[in-house]
Image (cartoon, coloured by chain):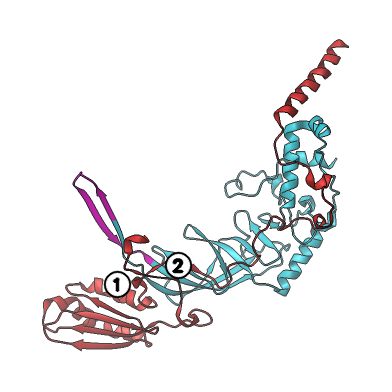
């Protein structure tokens, strides 16, 4: 029976940027809940989990999903022949709540260092407390400014990861940074020459470089609490 | 960009004295304007001194400003930084607005940052928090106790259906349909 339900859910693929707007409303729940804290569980009853947050931590589910996908191709007959039938996983509804409780506890204890992946001027950076970043190109913040980086694609501690789809819900994670330097890069030389064609160009350019210090990466709310829209 | 600047110093991203952790300190310590009172090449710098210098000094109490008039020499700005760097910049024939921008650049940078080619654009004390991935990461620990060879862990469930198997399937299907048609 478990297998037929899984078929109804469709193939379980990791979330991507572009597939978010295309989701149907009934699909507005996390597709997978995975953790390295316990056995893999399926997120059918996780209606209260914020829609854009997916807990992650295990590759086991992916493997299971691939088993089911391959069973789609071969059909049931093939499975009975090749004796490849997947192990029946029993559905435990309170595993999910246990995992969420454990994650909340971990977040509250701050037992390990947090890190996050932020989107900043078209680039993605993995940041943790005390990091230094160099942002190239024109960027208005000036030295001494304290800013918060809001486009958080992923936030994680040692034992759990919150994966945004595409970004973690606003207000869940706060990343503060200080601008410590704004200068110019070294002179970059662009030299072009075509042999035997009397063609030679040389250009020099210096890019604006802003150095950021990441002050803190903090996971604020408890993960299963309803979203507080801060913006 | 590596070999084209053979004689350029390279370095890694650093900030002096944990700047930005807890407090931020402007790294420009001292700025010296050297200029001529009569020559045209110093015109822009003289304009800056007449119009903006007092505001500049007022807005940046941590920066010591020196004026050094000298006869018939081209204008120069020298910035000195808390990490010991010294940036010398000729501003001969520069206009007032250009000089304003260059001074802003000297003020905001944390040293002679243009001097080195950065090898990395990020610096972290903690390169890995969740640890490196291994094939056994996030796997069910029951594998540790299983006796191998084991049917459950040894099964081949990664590869697609093989041609032989496909033929066999087709054959079985045909047999089924043959039986149905016979009935």
- Which-is-in-front pick, marks 1 and 2? 2
Residue B182 marker? none
In the rendered structure, the answer to whether residue B177 lies left or right of residue A220 reads right
Of residues A158 and A41, the one nearer the viewer is A158
Residue to which mark 1 is pinned: B101
Pointer 1 indicates a residue of which chain?
B
**Majority secondary structure of magenta residues:** strand
Chain letter, colour cyan in render: A
Q: Residue reaching furthest top?
A: B182
Q: Is residue A231 visible?
A: no
Q: Could you tell me residue A165's position as x and y percent?
A: 62, 53
Of residues B134 and A135, the one nearer the viewer is B134
Q: Could you tell me residue A121's position as x and y percent?
A: 47, 60
In the rendered structure, the answer to whether residue B90 lies left or right of residue A45 reads left
Secondary element at image label 1: helix
At a point 47% along the width and 81% down the height, the residue shown is B24
- Does A204 appear in magenta? yes
At a point 82% along the width and 46% down the height, the residue shown is B152
In the rendered structure, the answer to whether residue A89 lies left or right of residue B62 reads right
In the rendered structure, the answer to whether residue A49 lies left or right of residue A203 reads right
Chain letter, colour red in render: B
- Does A231 appear in magenta? no
- Residue A107 in the image: above or below residue B62: above
The answer to whether mark 1 and mark 2 are in CB contact below 8 A is no
Q: Is residue B146 visible?
A: yes
At a point 11% along the width and 83% down the height, the residue shown is B72
Magenta span: A191-208
Q: Quadrant of residue A9?
A: top right
Residue to which mark 2 is pinned: A134
Classify 10 Å Cα crowding around label 1: few (below 14), some (14-19), many (20 and above).
few
């Amino acid at each position: 029976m478990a297998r037929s339900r899984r078929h109804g859910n469709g193939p379980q693929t990791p979330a991507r940027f572009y597939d978010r707007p295309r989701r149907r409303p009934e699909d507005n729940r996390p597709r997978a809940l995975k953790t390295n804290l316990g056995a893999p569980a399926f997120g059918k009853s996780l209606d209260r989990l914020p829609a854009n947050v997916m807990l992650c931590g295990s590759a086991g589910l992916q493997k299971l999903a691939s088993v089911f996908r391959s069973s789609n191709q071969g059909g049931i007959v093939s499975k009975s022949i090749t004796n490849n039938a997947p192990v029946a996983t029993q559905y435990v509804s309170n595993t999910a709540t246990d995992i969420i409780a454990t994650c909340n506890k971990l977040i509250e204890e701050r037992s390990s260092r947090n890190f996050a992946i932020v989107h900043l001027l078209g680039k993605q950076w993995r940041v943790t407390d005390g990091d230094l970043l160099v942002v190239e190109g024109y960027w208005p913040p000036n030295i001494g400014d304290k800013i918060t980086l809001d486009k958080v694609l992923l936030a994680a501690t040692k034992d759990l990861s919150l994966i945004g789809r595409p970004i973690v819900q606003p207000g869940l994670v706060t990343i503060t940074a200080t601008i410590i330097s704004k200068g110019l890069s070294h002179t970059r030389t662009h030299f072009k020459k075509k042999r035997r064609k009397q063609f030679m160009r040389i250009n020099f350019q210096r890019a604006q470089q802003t150095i950021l210090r990441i002050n803190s990466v903090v996971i604020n709310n408890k993960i299963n609490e309803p979203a507080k829209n801060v913006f | 960009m590596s070999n084209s600047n053979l004689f350029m110093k390279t370095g890694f991203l650093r900030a002096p004295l944990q700047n930005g952790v807890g407090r931020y300190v402007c790294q420009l310590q001292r700025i010296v304007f050297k200029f001529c009172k009569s020559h045209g090449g110093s015109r822009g710098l003289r304009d800056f001194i007449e119009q903006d210098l007092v505001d500049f000094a007022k807005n940046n109490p941590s920066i010591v400003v020196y004026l050094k008039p000298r006869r018939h020499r081209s204008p120069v700005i020298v910035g000195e930084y808390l990490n010991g760097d010294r940036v010398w910049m000729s501003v001969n024939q520069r206009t007032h607005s250009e000089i304003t921008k260059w001074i802003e650049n000297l003020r905001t940078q944390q040293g002679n940052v243009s001097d080195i080619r950065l090898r990395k654009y990020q610096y972290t004390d903690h390169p890995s928090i969740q640890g490196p991935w291994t094939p056994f990461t996030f796997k069910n620990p029951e594998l540790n106790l299983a006796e191998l060879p084991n049917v459950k862990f040894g099964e081949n469930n990664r590869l697609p259906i093989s041609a032989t198997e496909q033929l066999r399937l087709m054959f079985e299907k045909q047999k089924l349909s043959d039986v149905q048609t016979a009935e």
